[in-house]
Image (cartoon, grey):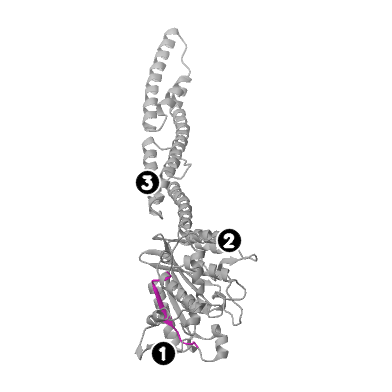
């Protein structure tokens, strides 16, 4: 299934409930192989969608994530766009995820935190987009991370720590747009990562505001051990052109911005890893199941439990696993068939189909315990298939054997009804003896030819005895 434009993935209903878009679900389930997820989040009206469009190389309006030039948030909920990638290791897809801007008047802090949490839980590479500098205000804009432990649990045990959540969070890249400072410290040039690390160091002071912001810094450090930063200058100097930035030719953008954008692309596509959970790579169907479980939890007013969501993913994949094994068997041994098989032939083709089913079960397993859980179910299904196969073949065999018997017995029937010369008693006796000798010869030849032509077929002798008993 090709994707020609961005799709809404997780939407918000009028009563502030999350919903998975059926079209996005269909698209994701159609993907083959591993899926890598790049999510972007940040305050509304800071150019997140524009940045994603540049990463995707989308410049035609109908193929872009929505970008607006007003004070209203353009993206609603979470939208996706998939880009297939092929390499020597097989098929995989990169899915770009655009999230609704944080801090808009249209959403509460609760919904902001939930959207932020969904983006973190579903992505393998997370971009936080901001403008200006990383100062105390920028840190405060990320204060919703304080609530993440309230909205996400690793297990049913409510004492999940920030360090345990970090095991399930993606790589974190802070992109600072419209950056105007020199990356220096005490007259020494520093990298953008050093700039981020300096900004995350605790500030001096004991005021409530300082304590709160230090808490945010500490959580960012704990949640995202794999973190980095990229700074980017303003793409244009002209304010009027900036308001209509998506329509500006790429070549008209500042060369420094274009260089930094190229560096960002390289960073994203080089470091991007498949989305995993419990050390297992996810496919599109698993991602949908995971998202649905998180959404259901939020809609019920509960915090998503990662371990429970994974259990449901495994359960759903186990069902798909069993279906895949059954499809592999059916493709190898389609039923019903039209030509009768010998017992040996049927046993051979059944064993081959059985092997393919078991191989498919192992090949598509997402967790070590799914195979032993599904093997007994598959064996029960295969046993039912075995009985059905032999019953079907036995029916075909009987039809075939009757046809062979009737065809081979026709000369004997003709011999029986041949008129005899009845001119005298001696002639009748001689004719009768000759007919009986001929019948005996024909019957022996009939039996020999029948056994030869139907060698190995089920019910061969039973059908012969029944046929002769009726004669």
Q: Which residue is mark 2?
A: 299
- Are circles 3 and 1 on residues that touch, CB within 8 Å? no
The image position of residue 275, as x and y in percent, is 43, 65
Earlier-in-chain disc, 1 versus 2: 1
Q: Residue at x 65, y 66 (%)?
A: 14
Q: Which residue is mark 3?
A: 355
Q: Secondary structure at mark 2?
A: helix
- Residue 76: image quadrant is bottom right
Horizontal side of 162 relative to 98 (left or right) equals left
Q: Residues within 10 Å of mark 1 (few under 14, many from 20)?
A: few
The image position of residue 190, as x and y in percent, is 36, 85
- Front in this rendered view, residue 124 or 196: 196
Front: mark 3 or 1: 1
Mark 1–mark 2 Cα distance, whole angstroms, equals 46 Å
Q: Residue at x 38, y 53 (%)?
A: 363
- Residue 12: image quadrant is bottom right
Res. 182 mark: 1
Res. 119 mark: none
The answer to whether 458 is drawn above or below residue 28 in the figure is: above
Front: mark 3 or 2: 2
Q: Secondary structure at mark 3?
A: helix
The answer to whether 439 is drawn above or below residue 300 in the figure is: above
- Are circles 3 and 2 on residues that touch, CB within 8 Å? no
Earlier-in-chain disc, 3 versus 1: 1
């Amino acid at each position: 299934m090709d994707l020609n434009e961005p799709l809404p993935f997780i939407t918000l209903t009028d009563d502030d409930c999350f919903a998975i878009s059926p079209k996005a679900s269909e698209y994701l389930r159609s993907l083959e192989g591993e899926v890598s997820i790049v999510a972007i989040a940040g305050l509304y009206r800071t150019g997140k969608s524009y940045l994603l469009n540049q990463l995707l190389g989308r410049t035609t309006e109908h193929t872009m994530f929505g970008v607006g030039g007003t004070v209203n948030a353009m993206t609603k909920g979470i939208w996706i766009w998939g880009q297939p990638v092929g390499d020597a290791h097989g098929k995989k897809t990169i899915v770009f995820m655009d999230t609704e801007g944080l801090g808009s008047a249209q959403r509460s802090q609760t919904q902001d935190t939930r959207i932020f949490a969904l983006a973190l839980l579903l992505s393998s590479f997370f971009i936080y987009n901001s403008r200006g500098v990383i100062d105390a205000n920028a840190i405060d804009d990320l204060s919703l991370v304080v609530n993440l432990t309230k909205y996400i649990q690793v297990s049913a045990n409510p004492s999940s720590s920030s360090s345990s959540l970090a095991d399930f969070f993606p790589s974190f890249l802070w992109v600072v747009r419209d950056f105007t400072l020199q990356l220096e410290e005490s007259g020494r040039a520093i990298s953008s990562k050093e700039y981020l690390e300096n900004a995350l160091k605790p500030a001096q002071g004991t005021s409530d505001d300082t304590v709160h912001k230090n808490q945010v810094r500490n959580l960012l450090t704990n949640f995202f051990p794999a973190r980095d930063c990229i700074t980017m200058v303003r793409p244009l100097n002209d304010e009027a052109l900036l308001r209509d930035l998506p329509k500006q030719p790429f070549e008209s953008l500042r060369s420094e911005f274009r260089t930094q954008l190229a560096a960002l692309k390289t960073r994203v596509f080089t470091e991007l890893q498949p989305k995993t959970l419990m050390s297992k790579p996810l496919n599109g169907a698993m991602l949908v199941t995971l998202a649905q479980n998180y959404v259901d939890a939020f809609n019920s007013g509960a915090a998503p439990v990662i371990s429970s969501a994974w259990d449901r993913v495994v359960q759903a994949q186990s069902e798909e696993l069993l279906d895949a094994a059954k499809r592999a068997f059916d493709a190898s041994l389609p039923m019903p068939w039209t030509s009768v098989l010998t017992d040996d032939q049927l046993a051979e083709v059944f064993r081959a189909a059985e092997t393919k089913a078991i191989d498919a079960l192992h090949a598509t397993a997402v967790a070590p315990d799914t195979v032993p859980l599904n093997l007994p179910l598959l064996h029960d299904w295969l046993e039912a298939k075995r009985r059905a196969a032999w019953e079907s073949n036995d029916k075909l065999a009987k039809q075939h054997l009757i046809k062979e018997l009737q065809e081979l017995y026709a000369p004997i029937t003709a011999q029986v009804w041949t008129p005899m010369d009845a001119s005298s008693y001696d002639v009748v006796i001689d004719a009768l003896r000759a007919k009986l000798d001929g019948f005996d010869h024909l019957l022996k030849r009939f039996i020999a030819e029948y056994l030869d032509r139907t060698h190995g077929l089920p019910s061969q002798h039973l059908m012969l005895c029944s046929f002769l008993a009726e004669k």
